[in-house]
């Protein structure tokens, strides 16, 4: 079975803009024809450096153009790009993947040398950019005239390896999700269903790897100057500016980045008339943020909360109107946050359910990664074969309602257990987050398993006083059937979060802080 490859997906419309990398005070525009030419020249340079089909090649750069072109060039050669979160446990990731090639910016190579990343596996180190690095060969392409005719490429085998993408490690040790060519094709098909891309669409990619997918979807892709080591600390001007300058029609980003955009627009009374769609991913979209975004975009714009994971993205989506309706009027027995219905071709099941139908969300379908690279232990726990393909256990707790919609209740590992009860994080937090003056809350357990004290940590908005924040949360939980089980409320001005999106709360660190805080005040 063959599927359309990179060359086929980039063919046509050579004068259309493929990628715009936005930097402070400047931007770099690449047209589709130029991107195709550079990919082929990079493929030649990689081949001359010794890269061969089947080689695993780590690509580590914050330059969206280099990340995209190098990854595509590796794909043209039949090599396998490997994407790793820069702030993850890179050394352990490289032990798992044992890469033959390491392509990266100078800073990445300095880290590789200083920390021993990839030793002794990396045989072909290549540095991107114009700055030379002693002892590392620059990835240099010759001029088009000197290269002769471009080589022919054939469509890839759908079952062949296409990419290895590591999880962020926010909920445990990072793992490399293997994507076959059919997996990537399934993800592109699912995103096409979600976005319904048009030839004149302009996509703002609030997460660097999205720059890889935009050109393959046929849309102009903007890569703004996001702080990839701390997205929530990005300059909002560098996010909103490109939207206005280039007329972005689709915004795809995490809640942390979307919050920056919404706040900046509100503060400066800016509207974004070109936006027809907002896709939020990486953590649940709260109604309050959706309402703030509504003030900045046209009335007919679509705002979607998209559910998925590195191992299966996307899975389902729900628009802000339905999100608000299910929050205000949830069906009987369905607390937490509604994730919407699975996308066409995807199946969701709830495994190991209790008497209320609560269990672990599992997904099968064309967007699901079939395995983790070199991690049979993880495969044994999360993967199983079914008539509908590989079934992946997500580690998320949830339910399915009578209309086939998924409901999210939090991570299975974050379930709070005490004498005679179990509390899911999303059940409590979805209610507490509606309190006025509150940015977000996080439920953590203090103590040993089965005997935990439920502690709700509260992150107020800057203008909210400590007393007002606590009073508002208490009022929001007063009528919640499980609200009385919360044993302590603690104010924390800023929650620790995952490095990739700055949206998922690092509950292990937060629980440790809560335990120390309670001990300090004698609990």
Image (cartoon, rainbow, N blue to C red):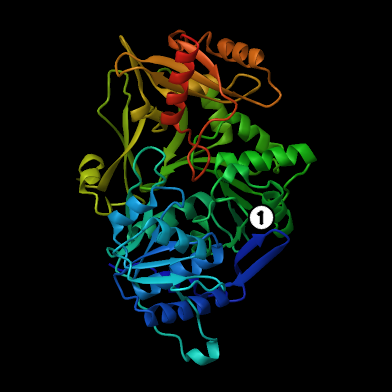
Foreground: 380 or 33? 380
Residue 223 placement: quadrant:
bottom right
Answer above or below: position of 487 versus 314: above
In the figure, is residue 484 to the left or right of 130? left
Answer above or below: position of 195 versus 52: above
Where in the figure is residue 179, as x and y percent of width and height? 34, 57
Where in the figure is residue 363, as x and y percent of width and height? 32, 41
Residue 400 placement: quadrant:
top left
Residue 26 placement: quadrant:
bottom right
In what quadrant of the picture does the N terminus appear?
Answer: bottom left
Residue depicted at x 51% and y 65%: 106
Q: Is residue 334 visible?
A: no
In the figure, is residue 76 to the left or right of 64? left
- What is the residue that sits farthest to the right in this orientation? 269
Where in the figure is residue 238, as x and y percent of width and height? 69, 52
Answer above or below: position of 204 versus 159: above
- Give the residue number, with chain letter if any, for mark 1: 248
User: Does dot 1 land on a helix, a strand or a loop?
Assistant: loop
Where in the figure is residue 458, as x and y percent of width and height? 55, 21
In the figure, is residue 57 to the left or right of 460? left
Answer above or below: position of 45 versus 400: below
């Amino acid at each position: 079975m063959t599927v359309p490859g990179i060359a086929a997906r980039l063919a046509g419309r050579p004068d259309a803009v493929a990628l715009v990398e936005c930097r402070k005070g400047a931007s770099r525009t690449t047209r589709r024809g130029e991107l195709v030419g550079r990919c082929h020249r990079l493929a030649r340079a990689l081949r001359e450096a010794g890269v061969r089909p089947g080689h695993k090649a780590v690509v580590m750069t914050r330059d969206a153009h280099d990340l995209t072109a190098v990854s595509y060039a590796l794909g043209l050669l039949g090599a396998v790009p490997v994407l790793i979160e820069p702030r993850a446990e890179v050394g352990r990731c490289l032990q798992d993947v044992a890469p033959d090639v390491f392509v990266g910016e100078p800073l990445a190579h300095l880290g590789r040398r200083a920390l021993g990343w990839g030793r002794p596996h990396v045989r072909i180190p290549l540095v991107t950019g114009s700055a030379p690095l002693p002892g590392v060969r620059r990835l240099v392409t010759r001029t088009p005239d000197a290269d002769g005719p471009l080589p022919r490429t054939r469509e890839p085998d759908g079952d062949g390896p296409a990419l290895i993408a590591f999880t962020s490690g926010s909920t445990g040790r990072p793992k490399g999700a293997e994507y076959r060519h059919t997996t990537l094709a399934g993800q592109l098909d699912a995103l096409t269903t979600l976005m319904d891309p048009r030839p004149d669409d302009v996509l703002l990619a609030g997460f660097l790897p999205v720059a890889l997918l935009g050109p393959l979807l046929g849309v102009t892709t903007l890569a703004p100057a996001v702080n990839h080591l701390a997205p929530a600390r990005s300059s909002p001007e560098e996010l909103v500016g490109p939207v206005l300058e280039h007329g972005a029609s689709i915004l795809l980003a995490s809640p942390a980045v979307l919050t920056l955009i919404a706040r900046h627009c509100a503060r400066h009374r800016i509207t974004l008339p070109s936006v027809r769609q907002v896709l939020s991913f990486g953590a649940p979209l709260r109604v309050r943020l959706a309402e703030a975004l509504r003030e900045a975009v046209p009335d007919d714009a679509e705002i979607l909360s998209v559910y998925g994971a590195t191992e299966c993205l996307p899975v389902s989506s729900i628009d802000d109107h339905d999100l608000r309706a299910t929050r205000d009027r949830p069906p009987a027995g369905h607390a937490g946050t509604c994730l919407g219905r699975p996308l066409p071709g995807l199946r969701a099941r709830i495994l190991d359910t209790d008497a209320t139908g609560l269990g672990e969300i599992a997904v099968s379908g064309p967007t699901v990664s079939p395995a983790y690279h070199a991690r049979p232990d993880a495969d044994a726990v999360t993967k199983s074969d079914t008539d509908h393909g590989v079934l992946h256990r997500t580690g998320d707790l949830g339910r399915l309602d009578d209309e086939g919609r998924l409901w999210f209740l939090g991570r299975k590992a974050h379930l709070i257990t005490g004498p005679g009860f179990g509390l899911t994080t999303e059940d409590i937090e979805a209610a507490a987050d509606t309190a006025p003056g509150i940015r977000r809350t996080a439920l953590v357990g203090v103590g040993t398993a089965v005997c935990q004290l439920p502690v709700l940590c509260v992150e107020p908005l800057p203008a909210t006083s400590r007393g007002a924040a606590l009073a508002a949360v208490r009022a929001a939980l007063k009528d919640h059937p499980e609200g009385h089980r919360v044993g302590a409320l603690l104010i924390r001005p800023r929650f620790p979060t995952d490095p990739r999106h700055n949206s998922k709360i690092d509950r292990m660190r937060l629980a440790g802080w809560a335990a120390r805080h309670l001990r300090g005040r004698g609990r």
